[in-house]
Image (cartoon, coloured by chain):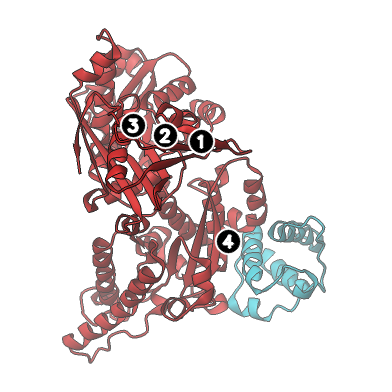
Chain colours: A red, B cyan
Amino acid sequence: MQELEYPFDSEYILKKAKSIKKALLEEKTTRIQKKIAVLGGSTTHDIVKVLELFLLHYGIEPQFYESEYAQYWQDAMFDNAALAAFAPDIIYIHTSNRNIQEYPQLSDTEEAVDAILGETYRHYEVMWDKLQKSYHCPIIQNNFEMPAYRLLGNKEASDVHGRISFLNRLNERFYQYAREHNHFYINDIAYLSACYGLDRWADSFYWHMYKYALCLPAVPVLSFNVANIIKSVYGKNKKALVLDLDNTLWGGVVGDDGAENLEIGQETSMGQVYSEFQEYLKRQKDIGIMLNVSSKNEEENAMAGLMHPDGILKPEDFVLIKANWEPKSKNVAQIASELNIMQDSLVFVDDNPAEREIVRKSLSGVAVPKMDSPEQYIRILDRSGFFEVTSLSQDDRLRSEMYKANLERKKEQESFGSYEDYLHSLAMKGTIKPFEPLYMARIAQLTNKSNQFNLTTRRYTQAELEQISADNAYITLYGKLEDKFGDNGVVSVLIGHREKEILHMDLWLMSCRVLKRDMEYAMLDTLVYTCAKAGIKEIKGYYYPTAKNKMVEGFYALMGFTLEKTDETGGTVWYYKIEADYENKNKVIKVVEA
Amino acid sequence: MTRETVYEKLNEVFRDVFDDEEIEVNDSTTADDIEDWDSLEHINLIAAIEQEFGIKFSMGQVVTMKNVGEMVDIILSRMD
């Protein structure tokens, strides 16, 4: 829904919240359901109301637990049957500097200030530890916004007695905790309030009238930020950018003006604007966002533009470059299919409103931010939260390289007589082992992101996965695949739980980047051996149909399982008897096993 | 701006905020007359009215307003 995309009209959202919700619920999309506990240190009513809208927009149907006014700490620390029964999937703690109980006094010694700081921090730390222990779920915690006034003026920032100094130091302690804990995310209201304007954000009218720690019109800004963290935790980030060239990556039209006359580089103000934007995009690539081009241009001209000596992005920074005269909607759809990702994982960036409209109308789910003036491009992309980072794995950093290697493989494939010859030529090496801490972040990411090659589409948080991997009743396997073109990283994840001599498969998924490489057979081989060793005689496979996983409908049949039953929704149950004389099904991947 | 025009706009705002096309407010309307008008919705209502008329109520005004009539008085006094 366009009303909920950045830059949104906060007043409109607040006023129309009820009808927007109705419209969202009428949309025919499938949403994942999540239980979100909001523990507030001040009023949270409208924060929750608007958060619900943004989450519905992101394909998440939330159910809320909302603490009584300012009861965040009590709710967390003491026996709380209601919260326990609610069993949150995620906890958001909405505190602010209004919740600071003690600030340093001017007469305090430095040691005394440190003691107050430590005590204030402990108040939060014990709460996080307690919540983590009781609910094993991700926690989102506000940091502290800057105070509305400065008794010591500018010295508030540097003097240890200053509140700005105190809050900054406290924030740093929060960040330290975040660095040390994987499922703990900071909701950066210090940054949000600065962007919004602290004077407006901290308008005390809303505190004294309604006990809101921020002004009402800023509530959507806050809720949007929280929604972005939540959707990122559940794997709903975008994955790739599709960029126009002329007047998007540089000023001017390369086909008309010639590459040498484009505005890019430090010579002109406009050139600087485009350079800064290219620089920003290049850094997106470093966090794993795949860059692609869709441009109405002769390919030769597009390349000439991208090879401009002052340009920061070079042809090799892109995974796919589509420079032709086809409709952009066609190119964008093609890019999704060649990258093997869903259309709704793409962000289309184009200065031309007509092109944006075509893509928006014909390709559902593609994000189409309004890019009107080049000096605003970075802000619009950045604040839209498309790529909100909640975890950063090695895989993210290498993603573009991996996808490019994939395209190389495709090319090579065409030169072989048989497909099997081709697979052999890849010199594939697989590592298939029970879950290991090193890969847990990536495993969690895969379980939350994979939609197509996913038999049950069960989502797990990293905390749950850690519990499962430590539990003997479960068999877990991850699969990593390397070949002569590069390392694909962790690409397949299996979880099964044991009931006597039967293993029930809770999860079987594979990344589409390694389709048709026989990795699924290698996984089955290792699964069968692992089961045999553990005295398991039978494996039960389950297929639950979703809007996106039709590709694996017949997966278990292909793996040699026998159909046991089909339910009215098309879900199927399969079984596989483990024989002593099992013969490996994978013949092309050399596997290192546990 | 006439009192009638203020009411026309005000009715629109009330209908948006409470998502009810039937609402018709008058001088004596109070929170008791509209089912969903509780203290939590009050804040949204005030914010939406401020936005509609491009004004900002002071805290003192919000605290002492007794009914919609008084609200309209304040709005009109700011429109001059």
Front tag of 4 and 2: 2
Q: Residue at x 21, y 79 (%)?
A: A159
Total numbered badges shown on the rendered structure: 4
Q: Position of residue A104 (x, y in %)?
A: 27, 86
Q: Residues within 10 Å of mark 3 (few under 14, many from 20)?
A: many
Q: In which chain is the residue bearing label 4?
A: A
Q: Residue at x 25, y 70 (%)?
A: A173
Q: Position of residue A107 (x, y in %)?
A: 23, 92
Numbered circle sitting on residue A520: 3
Q: CA distance from mark 3 to mark 4?
A: 44 Å
Q: In which chain is the residue bearing label 1?
A: A
Q: Position of residue A497 (x, y in %)?
A: 39, 51
- Whether residues under marks 4 and 1 lie with C-beta atoms below 8 angstroms apart, the answer is no
Front tag of 2 and 1: 2
Please state, as top left, top right, bottom left or bottom right, where the C terminus of chain A lies in the image. Answer: top left
Q: Which is nearer the eye, A336 or A438?
A: A438
Q: Residues within 10 Å of mark 1 (few under 14, many from 20)?
A: some
Pointer 4: what residue? A49
Q: CA distance from mark 4 to mark 2?
A: 35 Å
Q: Residues within 10 Å of mark 4 (few under 14, many from 20)?
A: some
Q: Earlier in the sequence, mark 3 or mark 4?
A: 4
**Type of the residue with mark 1:** Gly
Q: Earlier in the sequence, mark 2 or mark 1?
A: 1
Pointer 1: what residue? A365
Q: Classify mark 4: helix, strand or loop.
A: helix
In the image, is A138 to the left or to the right of A215?
left
- Whether residues under marks 4 and 2 lie with C-beta atoms below 8 angstroms apart, the answer is no
Callouts 1 and 3 in the same chain: yes
Pointer 2: what residue? A453
